[in-house]
Image (cartoon, grey):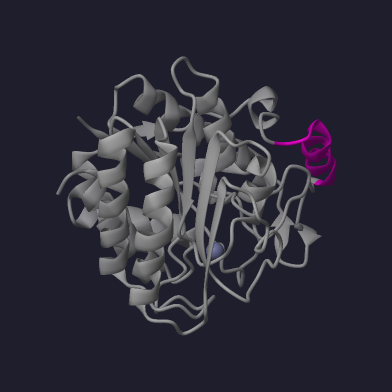
């Protein structure tokens, strides 16, 4: 069985300016490392196709989409919040990011791939039902999860988020949908400070103090995520794979490294094997030191691809 690697070169065209950390360099760095190590040759490389408006509306208000389309500039950039901007190509990239996750979901559910990684941007997990935020316009992983739930035989899904930032958007979208388990580890107190303290049976929030060592992260996975997954028994697992909790990431203050990302991927693989027919769709979120990001993605993919 194969691991699908899904991307599109136009995801590089979303550009919020030369000094913005969420830059096209991130995807270029990942590709370079995967090609140099030969790992890319072991994956089924697929090109994303743009999502339709109807697919985006599985997780977002029609108005949300309309507002973004109306704001899209013909040149330069237009800010939707203090650190999120649209350039003329941003929504094309955003449609491809969502479409990539839908393609990944279809490949995995049809059995053409055992699992999939979507190297896409803009990221998605801060985008709420009716709000773009934190470098995110559409919640790629949430739309993929909604799409999966429409398919025959898929009754429960899980979204696991190890990005250093809390997935407020994913929680907003799924807080009243008990068929979706959302587990998140995140630095706290820290951005985005929304939904971090929500109490719902299907929301597993694991706040981690700044400067904690990697054992605190691993303990949160073992004591909170894994029992929740055992109870939920998802038919497919989605991963919001952000790598900005890396010790060399400039954005935050947790201390993970490549071996922690390898370890957490192994834990998720074991759960997927037990409950989810090995089905995993992993979607890139954050990670702002391009070198640390690329090597972390490599470790994550080595596990997914069975190395
Ligand atoms: Zn992040």
Work out whether 281 lies above or below 298.
Answer: above
Q: Quadrant of residue 221?
A: bottom left
Q: Which residues are magenta?
A: 60-71
- Whether residue 143 is visible to the viewer of this picture, yes or no, is yes
Q: Name the residue rendered at 26%, 60% in the picture.
A: 262
Residue 181: x and y in percent read 52, 43
Q: Name the residue rendered at 43%, 59% in the picture.
A: 224
| Left or right of 196, for residue 239 | left
| Left or right of 126, for residue 104 | left
Residue 21: x and y in percent read 56, 69
Residue 292: x and y in percent read 36, 70
| Left or right of 236, for residue 299 | left
| Residue lying farthest to the bottom in this orientation | 211
Along the viewing direction, whichever of 72 and 225 lies nearer the viewer: 225
Residue 18: x and y in percent read 61, 68
Along the viewing direction, whichever of 136 and 74 lies nearer the viewer: 136
Work out whether 77 lies above or below 89.
Answer: below
Q: Name the residue rendered at 52%, 79% in the picture.
A: 209
């Amino acid at each position: 069985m194969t691991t699908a690697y899904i991307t599109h070169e136009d995801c590089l065209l979303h550009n919020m300016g030369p000094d913005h950390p969420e830059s096209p360099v991130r995807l270029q760095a990942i590709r370079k490392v995967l090609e140099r190590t030969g790992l890319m040759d072991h994956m089924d490389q697929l090109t994303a196709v743009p999502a339709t408006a109807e697919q985006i509306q599985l997780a977002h208000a029609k108005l949300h989409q309309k507002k973004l389309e109306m704001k899209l500039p013909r040149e330069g950039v237009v800010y939707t919040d203090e650190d999120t901007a649209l350039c003329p190509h941003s929504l094309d990239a955003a449609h491809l990011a969502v479409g990539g996750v839908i393609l990944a979901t279809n490949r995995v559910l049809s059995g053409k791939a055992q699992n999939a990684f979507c190297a896409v941007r803009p990221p998605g997990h801060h985008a709420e039902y009716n709000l773009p935020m934190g470098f995110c316009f559409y919640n790629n992983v949430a739309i993929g999860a909604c799409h999966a739930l429409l398919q025959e035989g898929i009754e429960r899904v899980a979204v696991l988020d190890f990005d250093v930032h809390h997935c407020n958007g994913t929680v907003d979208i799924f807080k009243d949908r008990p068929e979706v388990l959302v587990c998140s580890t995140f630095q706290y107190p820290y951005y985005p400070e929304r939904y971090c303290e929500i109490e719902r049976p299907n929301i597993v929030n694991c706040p981690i103090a700044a400067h904690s060592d990697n054992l605190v992260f691993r303990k949160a996975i073992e004591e909170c995520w894994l029992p929740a997954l055992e109870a939920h028994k998802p038919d497919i697992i989605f991963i919001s794979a952000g790598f900005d909790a890396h010790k060399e990431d400039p954005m935050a203050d947790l201390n993970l490294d490549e071996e922690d990302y390898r370890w957490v991927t192994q834990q998720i693989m074991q759960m997927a094997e037990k409950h989810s027919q090995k089905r995993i769709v992993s979607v890139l979120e954050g990670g702002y030191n391009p070198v640390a990001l690329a090597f972390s993605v490599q470790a994550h993919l080595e596990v997914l691809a069975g190395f």
